[in-house]
Amino acid sequence: MYIIKIILFSVVSFVLSCSPGKKSVCANGIMVTLEDASGLDGCTWLLKTGDDKVLHPINLDSLIPEPQHGKKYYALWEAADEMFSICMAGEMVRLTCVSPL
């Protein structure tokens, strides 16, 4: 009987922890807005922070498969100093975490 209670408790805990209503948020993530910059030569998508800093993410496609202009996210990034681009807008960064608002 004791083993059944443990198994039942484990199953219930597992099911509740995987509920679809929960969204993961990047710990200490900074709110950014996705902007379509395809009108600028050599640019595609840029991220804009609340203090108007512009970021040029080099790995956006792998983290946001269907980008939408104006959508807000929490994001973390690191500088991509070794990368170059013909898009002259924003600091080039490598996103390490992205989650929708």
Image (cartoon, helix red, strand yellow):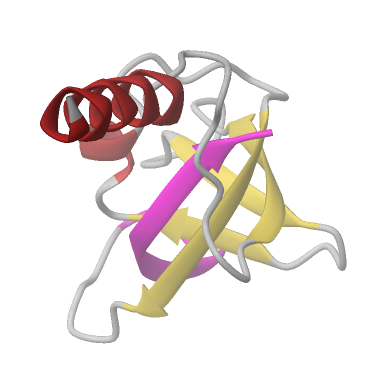
Q: Which residues are magenta?
A: 86-101
- Determine the image quadrant of residue 52: bottom right
Where is 25 relative to 41, above or below?
Answer: below
Q: Residue furthest left?
A: 3
On whether residue 63 falls in the magenta region, the answer is no
Front residue (pair 28, 18) = 18
Name the spot of residue 95 as percent of width and height, x first: 36, 59
Name the spot of residue 30 as percent of width and height, x first: 68, 63
Please state, as top left, top right, bottom left or bottom right, where the C terminus lies in the image: top right
How many labels were placed on the picture?
A: 0
Where is 31 relative to 43, above or below?
Answer: below
Q: Quick check: 21 left or right of 82?
A: right
Image point (69%, 49%), residue name: 32
Front residue (pair 27, 65) = 27
Name the spot of residue 70 as percent of width and height, x first: 72, 24
Name the spot of residue 20 as percent of width and height, x first: 46, 13
Q: Quick check: 31 left or right of 19?
A: right
Q: Residue furthest front?
A: 1
